[in-house]
Image: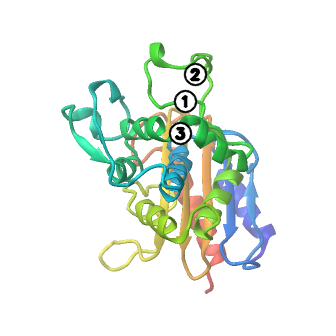
Amino acid sequence: MNQTLFYAQLEQTLRTFEGLFGLCVRPLEEGAFPTLEWNANESFPAASTIKVPILIEALSQVEKGVLELSERYPLEDSDKVGGAGILHELEPGLNLSLRDWLTLMIVLSDNTATNKVIEIVGQDRINALLERYPSTELVGKLQLPPERQNERQRRGERNWTNPRDLARMMFELHTGLLLEPEMTALALNILEKQQYKDMVGRSLPRDSSGELAVQVLSKSGEISGTRNDVALVYGPVPYSIALMTKGGEDLREHPENGMVLLGARVSRLVWDKLQPL
């Protein structure tokens, strides 16, 4: 591919964005193309992309026999937090398996489920995994009211990461460096079912029925001023990709949010440059 042309077109695509955009694209097959980066080492709010390492650490503990996917944990009223998901709308007492909690955390990006998994797995163990990724940290649970936040959260700190860490994490998940084959397959299966594909998957090829014609295994994330998406894209030339934004002025929680549309345009630009004619 012509990298000079790619970066010129990327710069043109980003010219009117008022915030900061970050990108990292890694080939899944060695030597297929040079890694593509744009502000890839810049720190961004992780938003719900932080749920990927939480999933990985939970499944690692299943592998080690510390946890069991079938073990059930009840939904308590005190577990419920706002934002993405459905559990905060349900009656307490629901008794879900660990597999169910993980599925809700990724497929519906449920924040209540995420906090439950953090509690089960242990924040310290998740951050031990994240020592592999030097710019990524789980500072605390999601969407907590101020009185339940930890000291760092009350100072305004958020869960942080960068495009390089996230693209590498997805690459290492795909290649089996993080989990054994059975748990790798489960993690990828859950990520493929994620329902929010408005950025990476939005503008990729579709079949005659409108369904994606390419496998996209992803996790998106949003908070005010930020829209992120990290994915494995299994096209003819497969790759891992992380799209990240911060400082955006479009604060709408809407699929036509300007940062979402920008991410979709960049995703298509990457696809067009990497796939054979």
Q: Residues within 10 Å of mark 3 (few under 14, many from 20)?
A: many
Residue drawn where x is 71% and y is 53% of the image: 164
Q: Which residue carries the number 3 mark?
A: 47
Tell me the quarter of the picture where residue 247 sits: top right
List x then y, in percent, for residue 82.
36, 29
Q: Residues within 10 Å of mark 1 (few under 14, many from 20)?
A: some
Tell me the quarter of the picture where residue 119 sits: top left
Residue drawn where x is 46% and y is 17% of the image: 148
Residue drawn where x is 68% and y is 59% of the image: 168
Q: Which residue carries the number 1 mark?
A: 140
Q: CA distance from mark 3 to mark 1?
A: 12 Å
Image marks 1 and 2: residues in contact by CB distance under 8 Å = yes
Q: Which residue carries the number 2 mark?
A: 153
Please tell me whether residue 142 is drawn above or below residue 103 in the rendered image: above
Give the number of the mark in front: 3 or 1. Answer: 1
Residue drawn where x is 69% and y is 52% of the image: 165
Element class at badge 1: loop
Direction from residue 22 to residue 78 in the image, left or right = left
